[in-house]
Amino acid sequence: MKSLIKNIGILVGIDESGRDRIMGGEMKNLATMTDAYVICEDGLISSYGSMKDLPEGRFDEETDARGGAVLPAMCDSHTHIVYAGSRETEFVDKINGLSYEEIARRGGGILNSADRLHEASEEELFEEAMPRLHQMLASGTGAAEIKSGYGLSTKDEIKMLRVIRRMAEASPMTIRATFLGAHAVARDYIGRQGEYVDLICNEMIPAVAAEGLADFVDVFCDRGFFTPEETARMLECGAKFGMRPKIHANELAASGGIQIGVAHKALSVDHLEFTGDEEIAVLLGSGTMPTILPGAAFFLGMNYPPARKMIDAGLGVAIASDFNPGSSPSGNMKFILSLACIKLRMNPQEAINAATLNGAYAMGLQATHGSVTKGKRADLWITEPVSSLEFIPYAYGVSLTAGMILGGKRVL
Ligand code: NIG
Ligand code: FE
């Protein structure tokens, strides 16, 4: 199949350098071309160029971008979109002064979602989660990571991961799955945290691996959740079964999570609200992608991670939505771009790089996703006509999506 996208006002994110991620001062550079076309063949980008040089030819599908921007579809490397029901009562508790940790201590939070997920069937979870994936697609996302972590028992964790596998089969988006049995200590194990860690290592990880259900292993390594020592143990168990770590770290305190993640060759360490010079020094020179989730800091009213300082120190960063019922009930990456600019003081080019190639890297998809590159998958986000690429994050809260092309096919 051969398809054409023509009359592109600005083609954004062109990269033929072959690099796998974008670091430090490079993040502010984003190659563009005005008045452009893209040709896709068999799902991949085969060529692009200026409209005046558009080659003659027949196409199975033609899209007129009508002067809109075309960007690499965004790569949302951190979500928890398989869950049952919502938690707006906790939202009101927070407005009335309770903190995320206080809510969790009262048995709300993750355990609240685990109770509800326990009651839901695989079919019900699938039906609830697919519209969330569709909302993400509509905001410009073409690839996403989805975590388990509301099961907290072998049976329910497997149930969640099977739902994720079904979603991957049903959606044109690229999906990566992460096992997050260590999201919280299950209710039955409260006061016996060590035994819960044993359960994860001895039973859950082998069972998940036996069905090939997870690409990555994650642990919520933070104050009040899992310690660096417990985290190290679970990451080592996951690694034995071929699951690379992607961990939650330093959201609630300087927990040592970043150091443990880097020491275990984590693909990413995520959240990072509490990141200082020591953590930045550890990340520099590592293969670990620091991943910032500004939606969680926004929604919980917390301090934002020091993204500006991290980039100025030479780090590449990714941004992701963290779409989940407790700390970030939205997967709108278009809004995350705006938050990155407004609250993290990233410029629009840095924010787009963070949401595209660096997000792809944080899922191990950098060879095929995240930039407009000949031979990469033709996953493209088409916007309404815009005056400049800066207009995209500037127009916060406004959906600019005019179309989505995934694997060279128009899906929206
Ligand atoms: O990434 N921080 C831990 N986990 C999620 C929140 C999960 C929840 O509250 O349901 C997060 O923010
Ligand atoms: Fe998360």
Image (tube, rainbow, N blue to C red):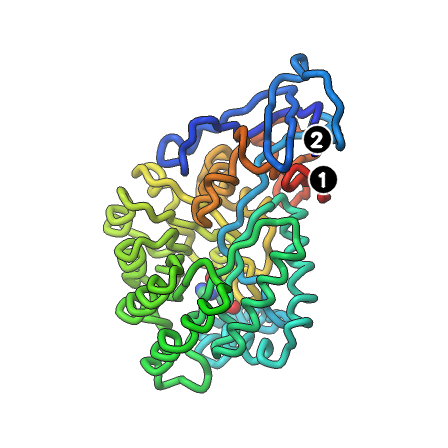
In the picture, the disc for residue 18 is none
Tell me what residue is drawn at x 68 percent, y 40 percent. 404
Q: What residue type is labelled 1?
A: Arg
Rendered view: 242 above or below 142: below
Q: Write down the quadrant of residue 2 in the picture.
A: top right
Q: Do the residues labelled 2 and 1 touch (CB within 8 Å)?
A: yes
Amino acid of disc 2: Ser
Q: Residues within 10 Å of mark 2 (few under 14, many from 20)?
A: many
Q: Measure the alpha-carbon separation of dots 2 and 1.
A: 9 Å
> Looking at the rendering, in which quadrant would you find the C terminus?
top right
Which numbered disc, 2 or 1, marks the residue closer to the eye?
2
User: Measured from the top left, where is residue 364 in percent x and y?
Assistant: 44, 47
178 horizontally vs 133: left or right: left
Mark number, residue 410: 1
Left or right of 396 in this view: 261: left
Q: Label 1: state its secondary structure.
A: strand
Q: Residue at x 46, y 83 (%)?
A: 187
In the rendered image, is residue 109 in sight? no
Q: Measured from the top left, where is residue 268 in percent x and y?
A: 39, 52
Residue 92 x, y percent position in the rendering: 59, 70
Q: Residue furthest top?
A: 52
Q: What element carries label 2?
A: strand
Q: Which of marks 2 and 1 is nearer the N terminus?
A: 2
Q: Residue at x 30, y 38 (%)?
A: 313
Q: Eyeballing the image, is 7 above or below 86?
A: above
Q: Mark 2 points at which residue?
A: 3
Total count of labels: 2
The location of residue 50, given as percent across then percent down, is 63, 17
Could you tell whether 267 is left or right of 32 in the image? left
Asked whether 293 or 103 is in front, the reply is 293
Residue sitting at x 59%, y 31%: 45
> Which quadrant holds the N terminus?
top right
